[in-house]
Image: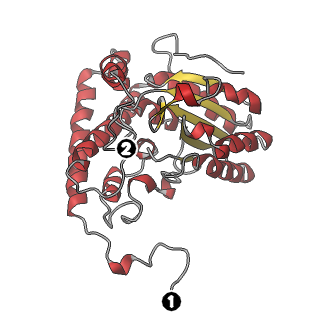
Amino acid sequence: MTDTLRTPQVPHEHGLDGPALLDAYRTMRTIRDFEERLHEEFATGDIPGFVHLYAGEEASATGVCAHLDDDRDVIASTHRGHGHCIAKHVDVKSMMAEIYGRTTGSCHGKGGSMHIADLSKGMLGANGIVGGGPPLICGAALAAKVRGDGGVGVAFFGDGGSNQGTTLESLNLASVWQLPAVFVAENNGYAEATSAEWSVGGGSIAARAAAFGMPGVTVDGFDFFAVHEAAGEAVARARSGGGPSLIEVQLTRYYGHFEGDQQKYRTDEVRHARAELDCIKRFRERVRGEVTVAQLDAIDTEVARLIDEAVSEAQAAPLPTGADLETDVYISYL
């Protein structure tokens, strides 16, 4: 029922043509540059609230969301949600404006980094509640099952979230109701500053799938193709009525739990990951001969320009005013 850590064994047997490979690379590069730039901008003091960066984990969101549609599939995210948003096609400029707290943001500047959402893209929102996403996905998956439209719900959560009762209850409910859901545990090794080696009973999040009668697999989160393959199987299973799946993606975040985290609980693992395991570097090596270096470099240039524009436009956009206080709420105060 549960597989061990795996990587596709045969090069080029990934079912992706040149345009699809370039699209995947663009998504990962956009996430990386967006987060690296936020790391710089947050240090200026101009960005309000907390920021949790996704850099280093790009292959997970990209590999999973490559199988999803904007119109019928939905995802629920975590406090570390920028990568999920970008992979689900939320507009980068509206995201940057939201993080800056501007009215042009995807939530009109009222949500900030931890609450970016875009229902038109099937992005239910980043979530400051650990383990808050899985119950939402059970609801979304149930709705898709009732509609019969083949829609799938995907819940992203971390190793810390894997221990929440909400997550375990959601796994059970999804199994009992055979919901078209995929649960993606992004195990970056730390629930804030607590090592997963100390906090995850049994040592494997994927192994818990057996307790709920669903398939579970652990994949190399530094390998886009490994994530893409596992997610493709899980999404196809959900669409065809085969019920839920659990995927544990093992990876490393390049920055602290939040911007300003001293990271005294870590050694040189980030240096090693950047130098030897980086998902973008590995992707470029893997696709050599299928796309050109010039094509990849051109995407780098285009993405850099996009991020520059996103920051400039966000900084120039207006802040919410007192008149905006009673808008975007569910009740009237009049």
Q: Amino acid at mark 1?
A: Leu
Q: SS for tag 1? A: loop
Count the marks: 2
> Is 212 on the left-hand or right-hand side of 313?
right
Above-or-below relation of 198 to 44: above
Q: Which residue is mark 2?
A: 258
Q: Is residue 150 visible?
A: no
Q: Residues within 10 Å of mark 2 (few under 14, many from 20)?
A: some
In this view, which residue lies farthest toward the front?
264
Above-or-below relation of 311 to 63: below
At x 36%, y 81%, the residue is: 323
Q: Which residue is mark 1?
A: 334
At x 37%, y 34%, the residue is: 28
At x 43%, y 25%, the residue is: 17
At x 40%, y 27%, the residue is: 21
Answer with the quarter of the image where residue 115 lies.
bottom left
Q: SS for tag 2? A: loop
> Is 208 on the left-hand or right-hand side of 64?
right
What's the colour scheme? secondary structure
Mark 2 in CB contact with mark 1 (< 8 angstroms): no
Q: Quadrant of the N terminus?
A: top right
Answer with the quarter of the image where residue 253 lies.
top left
Q: Nearer the viewer, mark 2 or mark 1?
A: 2
